[in-house]
Image: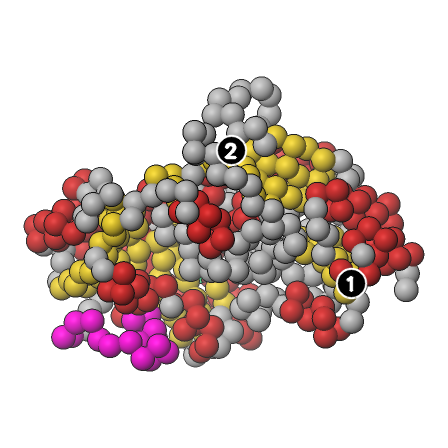
Amino acid sequence: MSDLEVRLRDIVGPAHVLTDSDLKAPYETDWTRRFAGVARCVVRPAGTDEVAAVVRACAEEGVPITVQGGNTGLVGGGVPAGGDVLLSLSRLTALGDVDPIEAQVTVGAGVTLERLQQHARAHGLDFGVDLAARSAATVGGLVATNAGGIRVLRYGSMREQVAGIEAVLADGSVVRRLVGLAKDNTGYDLTQLLAGSEGTLAVLTTVRVRLVPLQPARAVALVAVDSVGSALELLAAARAGLPSLSAAEFFLADGMALVRAHGGLPAPFGEDHFGYVVLECSGRTDPSDDLLDVLGESPAVADATIASDVTGVARLWAYRETHTEAVSAAGVPVKLDVSVPLRELAGLVADLSSTVAAAAPAARLIIFGHLGEGNLHVNVLGAEERAEEVTEAVLRLVASRRGSISSEHGVGRAKAHWLPLSRSEPEVTAMRRIKHALDPAGTLNPGVLI
Ligand code: MLT
Ligand code: ZN
């Protein structure tokens, strides 16, 4: 055993330094099975002081660290690069008391999104971010990647929920701002700098989050549409007419066929359609009538079905939410996560098939995502051997339509090469300078983002 492993064992206890291949394996491959690397060891500290000591030890020995939360990331940002220490934050599960006056709570980076939601709801509040990986995704990872999900249209992304952070810098020092002041213009906002920094600037250990009102009554509509234009027309009507709108999601006929085959789901309508929009409204009282009014007045609706009971809501959400697992069951996808201005969405969808086919003729394309933000998840199956070509072609297409090559999943290792497609040279230079200022030796998440 090396000096570093001995030091790490002293810090976290021998049971939490994993060097055995079988024990390390679950941390070394990502959820999609596309990204993998061999860690020198996996270290699982129990608190901020232990994280700081681990970071200091690795920095002194010159050994890089890859930081991992729930390992639900989709861009290879949380799996080892090879030979690094894999720092798992899964034991940082402290759950503070909900403060109903501030509507805030302080939680450890390793708390899952689902646990945070349950905790808030038990106190008559809720958390503003929700996504399908809620049972495993952790708060630290969600902040580090500025995760989005299905409620962005109502509450914004993860960074909007963050009122403060505690984090360990690359030299092992700790920055802590957990008071959660609603107003605090005192210099550079380190909290917001670290949100979305993908573990490249610091290791987030604790987060103070804002909570939102609990809206227990929900109504969900699955709406068939015959074009992207109709989906956008419906979105505009929903935004104008539904103050209770909490989600607007989108998928196409190929995705519907895939999730139906995977989950044995029944056909929701008598015939197939070009695409489908999921609209969700939530409030203190049943918002079904408002939703029905908007659907009834919109010429964009080709067909629709609505539910407001718990089972019915889950049944309709399943058509959208099981896309990721259905895609994964069909193979190892090239997953791209992009967004464009809404006026470019129809053109992008129209061009994607031919663009992907030119790069990988045998590939199968599944498109779904978050309509409200023009955020498409472009999943390409059967293209593992052509991953570079597909990525290059799709991201260039997105950039030509003024879009972002990384909408909500982060850049990770998967898209670092293509960063200049969405950021100018002066912007990338500024990012490099920030990275160098906070982590001059490049200890944290090397190869991720920049
Ligand atoms: C989703 O919106 O379902 C997630 O971002 C996961 C995915 O893209 O597969
Ligand atoms: Zn998404």
Q: Which mark is residue 163?
A: 2
Which colouring convention does the figure follow? Answer: secondary structure
User: Which of the four quarters of the rendered structure image does ligand 1 lie in?
Assistant: bottom left
Q: Amino acid at mark 1?
A: Ala
261 drawn magenta: yes
Residue 60 in view (yes/no): yes
* Lateral position of residue 103 relative to residue 285, left or right: right
Task: Find residue 191 and report its image quarter.
Answer: top right
User: At numbered mark 1, what does the secondary structure look like: helix, strand or loop?
Assistant: helix
Camera-side mark, 2 or 1? 1
Q: Amino acid at mark 2?
A: Ala
* Residue in view at x 30 percent, y 63 percent: 314
Above or below residue 52? Residue 70 is below
* Residue in view at x 65 percent, y 54 percent: 91
Above or below residue 359? Residue 84 is above
Q: Which mark is residue 389?
A: none
The residue carrying pointer 1 sits among few (fewer than 14), some (14 to 19) or many (20 or more) residues within 10 Å by Cα, namely few
Judge by depth and name the residue closer to the eye, 93 or 186.
93
User: At numbered mark 2, what does the secondary structure look like: helix, strand or loop?
Assistant: strand
* Lateral position of residue 229 relative to residue 63, left or right: left
**Which of the two discs, 2 and 1, labels the residue nearer the N terminus?**
1
Say whether mark 1 is within 8 Å of ligand 1: no
* Residue in view at x 26 percent, y 58 percent: 278
* Residue in view at x 81 percent, y 57 percent: 13
Task: Find residue 27 and report its image quarter.
Answer: bottom right
Q: Which mark is residue 15?
A: 1
- Marks 2 and 1 sit apart, C-alpha to C-alpha, by 34 Å
Whole-percent x and y of residue 161? 46, 38
What span is in magenta? 255-271
Whole-percent x and y of residue 422? 50, 45
